[in-house]
Amino acid sequence: MIQAQTQQPMATADKAPEQPQKPVIKTDAEWLKQLTDEQYHIARKSGTERPNGEVYQTFKKQGAGTYYCVGCNAELFSSKEKFDSHCGWPSFYDPSKAKNVKSIVDPDGSRIEVRCAICDAHLGHVFTGEGFNTPTDKRYCINGTILKFVPAETKKSD
C-alpha cells in the first residue's frame, strides 16, 4: 500500500505544533493516509520498532527540546526527562505533560502499556523499579518512530 505520508522516522519539526484541544478520532483509512507504514504499525496496531536502529541513534544525538505525538501533535515528553537506559529505545523517566500520556495494563497483565491520551496511539511501555538513578525510578520505553522532535530553540513560547 502506498502511503501519502513520507515523513522520516523521528522527524524534526521547525516549530511546536498546535496542541489538540479534544480527542483525535480517525478511521483506519485516514490514519493510513497520514502515517508511514511503520508509524501505522506501531501507533495503531501496537507494534514495536527494532531496537538500536537509526531512530534510536537519532534520539541519542538530539539535544534540548520537546517530543510530540506523530499522530495528533500532543506534547508527550521533554528532553529534560530523557535518559540513556541502554535498552535500544528512547527512554524518559516521566512524561512532560502527564495529561497527554496514559498507562493501561496489557491484555496479558504482564506489562504496562503507554498510549497517547489524545489519539490513543501506542507509544511503548513503562517499567518501574529497575534501579535507574532517576527521580521516579520509571523507564518510559518509547518507540521513537512515532515521536516528532522540536528543538528547544525553535519551540514557540506559551
Image (spheres, rainbow, N blue to C red):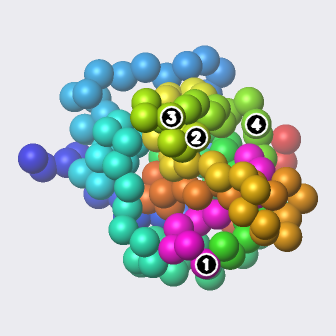
Pointers 1 and 3 in contact (C-beta within 8 Å)? no
Q: Residues within 10 Å of mark 3 (few under 14, many from 20)?
A: few
Look at mark 1 in the image and give the residue it sits on: 86
Query: Which circle's residue, 4 or 3, is located before the other in the chain?
Result: 4
Q: Marks 2 and 1, how far apart in space?
A: 20 Å
Q: Is residue 89 magenta?
A: yes
Residue at 32% of width from left, 39% of height from top? Answer: 45
Q: Is residue 39 left or right of residue 15?
A: left
Disc 1 secondary structure class: loop
Where's residue 140, x and y in %? 65, 54
Can you tell which quarter of the image residue 21 is in? top right
State the extent of the magenta-drawn residues as a range: 86-95
Q: Determine which residue is flagged by label 4.
A: 98
Q: Which mark is residue 60?
A: none
Residue contact at pointers 4 and 2, CB within 8 angstroms: no
On the image, which quarter does residue 135 sit in?
A: bottom right
Q: Amino acid at mark 3?
A: Gly
What is the residue that sits farthest to the right in this orientation? Answer: 135
Q: Looking at this view, is 88 or 70 the one in front?
A: 88
| Residue found 36% across the figure and 68% down from its top | 50
**Where residue 19 sits in the image (x, y, percent)?**
65, 33
Label located before the other in sequence (1 or 3): 1
Quickly name the residue at label 2. 112
Query: Which residue is outermost to the left?
Result: 1
> Can you see residue 65?
no
Nearer to me, 116 or 150: 116
Nearer the N terminus, badge 4 or badge 2? 4
Whether 98 is among the magenta residues is no
